[in-house]
């Protein structure tokens, strides 16, 4: 999902910390690791199921680890990042500004939605 895209109802979508094309290898390896599913062999998986499984990728998978690096905001955690982690985070953010074009109210709403999502997932 790219920043500033609209959903079917014309609302602005919240940006994602991964790109399905750019991160395909991470997605494949994460599905194999977490679900024991090889996507190249999953011919009968429909799009809705794929999206559902992708949204449930956990932090300890290859995609989850990269997303954690890209989305980190905690200054204390950032101080502990390696040079490589900073390069991953900065490279992504220079190409994908997740808040570009968002009002302050939209940013606050997006953060609340993410917090609610994590509360439901890890409650």
Image: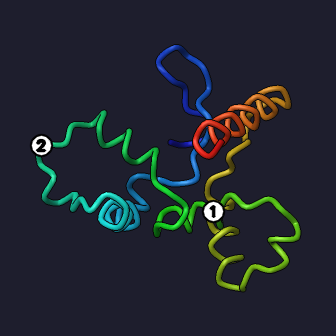
Seen at 67% across and 68% down, the residue is 89
Seen at 71% across and 85% down, the residue is 83
- Provide residue 84's location: percent of width, then percent of height: 65, 83
Which residue of the protein is positioned furthest toward the bottom in this rendering?
83
Residue 10 in which image quadrant: top right
In-image side of 69 versus 78 (left or right): left
In-image side of 20 versus 40 (left or right): right
CA gap between label 1 and label 2 equals: 30 Å
Q: Residues within 10 Å of mark 1 (few under 14, many from 20)?
A: some
Q: Residues within 10 Å of mark 2 (few under 14, many from 20)?
A: few
Does dot 1 land on a helix, a strand or a loop?
Answer: helix
Residue 115 in which image quadrant: top right
- Provide residue 56's location: percent of width, then percent of height: 45, 47
Seen at 37% across and 45% down, the residue is 53
Quadrant in the picture for the C terminus: top right
Which residue of the protein is positioned furthest toward the top in this rendering?
9
Query: What residue is pinned by disc 2?
Result: 44
In-image side of 78 versus 49 (left or right): right
Query: What residue is pinned by disc 1?
Result: 68
- N-terminal of the pair, mark 1 or mark 2, is 2
In the rendered image of this protein, does residue 75 appear above or below residue 110?
A: below
- Provide residue 87's location: percent of width, then percent of height: 67, 77
Residue 113 in which image quadrant: top right
Seen at 72% across and 41% down, the residue is 100
Does dot 2 land on a helix, a strand or a loop?
Answer: loop
- Provide residue 35's location: percent of width, then percent of height: 31, 57
């Amino acid at each position: 999902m790219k920043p500033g895209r609209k959903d079917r109802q014309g609302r602005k979508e919240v940006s994602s910390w991964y790109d399905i094309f750019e991160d395909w290898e991470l997605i494949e390896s994460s599905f194999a690791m977490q679900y024991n599913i090889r996507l190249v062999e999953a011919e009968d998986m429909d799009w809705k199921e794929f999206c559902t499984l992708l949204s449930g990728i956990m932090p300890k998978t290859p995609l989850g680890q990269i997303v954690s690096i890209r989305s980190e905001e905690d200054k204390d955690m950032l101080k502990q990042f390696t040079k490589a982690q900073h390069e991953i985070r900065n490279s992504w953010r220079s190409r994908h500004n997740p808040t570009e074009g968002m009002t302050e109210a939209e940013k606050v709403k997006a953060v609340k939605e993410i917090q609610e999502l994590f509360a439901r997932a890890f409650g």
